Image (spheres, grey):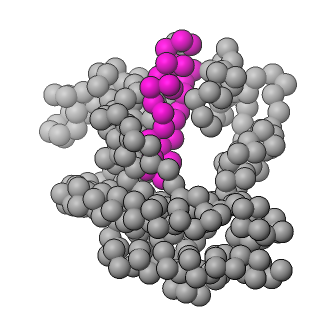
Amino acid sequence: MGPALIEARITPRTKAILPVHIHGMPCDMDAIMDVAARHSLVVVEDAAQAHLATYRGRYAGTIGKAGAFSLQATKNLSGIEGGFVVSDDADVADAARRIRTYGEDIADGSDLRGWYFRPYTVFSVGWNYRSNELSAAFARSQLRRLDEYTAIAQRNGRFLNQALASIPGLQPPVEPTDRTSVFHKYRVRFDVKELGVDMPAVEFRGRLLNALRAEGVDAVLWHTEPVTSFPILQTHAGFGGGYPWSLAPGSGGVDPADYPQAIDLLASSIVVCDEVHPIMIQPLEIMEAYAAAFAKVLRDPPALAGD
C-alpha cells in the first residue's frame, strides 16, 4: 500500500494507520503523517525489521505516535525473543507498560523493583508481555554491534542493487535518496515478460530459485501470500462477540483480490540470504559470487523456463 491508497480505505471506524517498514525500508512517512493529520488518526509504526533505518534524517519508528521494534532471533537487533515500544508521549508509554503487565499501573517509583508491595490493581486489559533478564542482557550486548551490522548489510545490499540492476528483467530493491534501508531482507523481483519467458511468474520463481541454489546462492522464499490471503481473514474464526474485537454488523471476510499488488509481488520475487545466513554478516566476496550466479542462470531465461 502506498500513501495515495490510504484515504480510500479510511472509514468512520478507522482509528490508526500502521505503516510497516518492511524489509528495513522506511515508508513515505511525511505523506502518511499528512493523511493521518487530515483525518485525526494516530500513526503507529511497525519497525520490526527497521532498526536504524532512516527517513529524511529521522529513525524509522520515531516519527509516529509510537514505534514497535522486534528483538526476535532473526532480526538485525536480536534479543532472542521479544521486542520494545518507543514513544515520546508519556500517556502512550504508560499504556504500553499497563498492557505489558496484566493492565497494572507500573509507574516509576511504584513498580516491582522493591518487591515489598504490589497492589495488583488492574486498570485496563493487559497481557504478560514482559521480557526476561537473559533476553534483555543479550539484546544489550547486540546493541553494541548494531552499527557494524547495519553498515555491512547496507554495503552488501547496495552492491547487489548495482550488480543486479544490470541484468535485464531483474528489479532489485529501490533505496530512495531521502531514506536509508537496513536490508533486513533482500528481495529481488523479476519480470517474466521482460525476461522473454512464457510462463506464470510463480512457476518461473521455482525454476529460478532452484537454479540459484544449485549455484550456491542462499536464495529462499519468505511468505508466498500476503496476510490478507490468510484463511483467518476470510473466515474471521474466533472474531465477534468482543473477542478479540467486535465486527461491524454484516461485515464479511477480506477479499484477497483487493490486494493484487501484494499478491503479484510475492509471486514474482525471491529473497537472497536467509535467516540462518543473514546479509548483515556476509563478506563482500559472497555478494560478488551471488551476483555472478544471477548473471549465469539468467543468461538464457527461456532455457531456464524449459522453453
Residue at (64%, 79%) from the top-left corner? 299
- Camera-nearest residue between 157 and 10: 157
Q: Is residue 304 visible?
A: yes
Above or below: residue 90 compared with residue 159? above
Residue at (66%, 34%) from the top-left corner? 243
Q: Which quadrant would the C terminus be assigned to in this image?
A: bottom right
- Camera-nearest residue between 231 and 215: 215
Q: Residue 55: which quarter of the image?
A: top left
Residue at (23%, 61%) from the top-left corner? 148
Q: Residue 286: which quarter of the image?
A: bottom left
- Camera-nearest residue between 123 and 91: 91
Q: How many marks?
A: 0
Q: Name the side, left or right, on which 65 lies relative to 230.
A: left
Residue at (50%, 25%) from the top-left corner? 31
> Residue 257 in magenta?
no
Q: Position of residue 182 (x, y in %)?
A: 38, 53
Q: Name the side, left or right, on which 43 lies relative to 252.
A: left
Q: Which residues are magenta?
A: 15-39
Above or below: residue 112 compared with residue 283? above
Q: Position of residue 190 (x, y in %)?
A: 65, 62
Q: Residue 280: which quarter of the image?
A: bottom left
> Residue 22 in magenta?
yes
Q: Position of residue 45 (x, y in %)?
A: 45, 35
Q: Is residue 80 visible?
A: no
Above or below: residue 74 compared with residue 58? below
Q: Which quadrant would the N terminus be assigned to in this image?
A: top right
Q: Position of residue 69 (x, y in %)?
A: 39, 45
Q: Name the side, left or right, on which 115 lies relative to 88.
A: left
- Camera-nearest residue between 169 and 6: 169
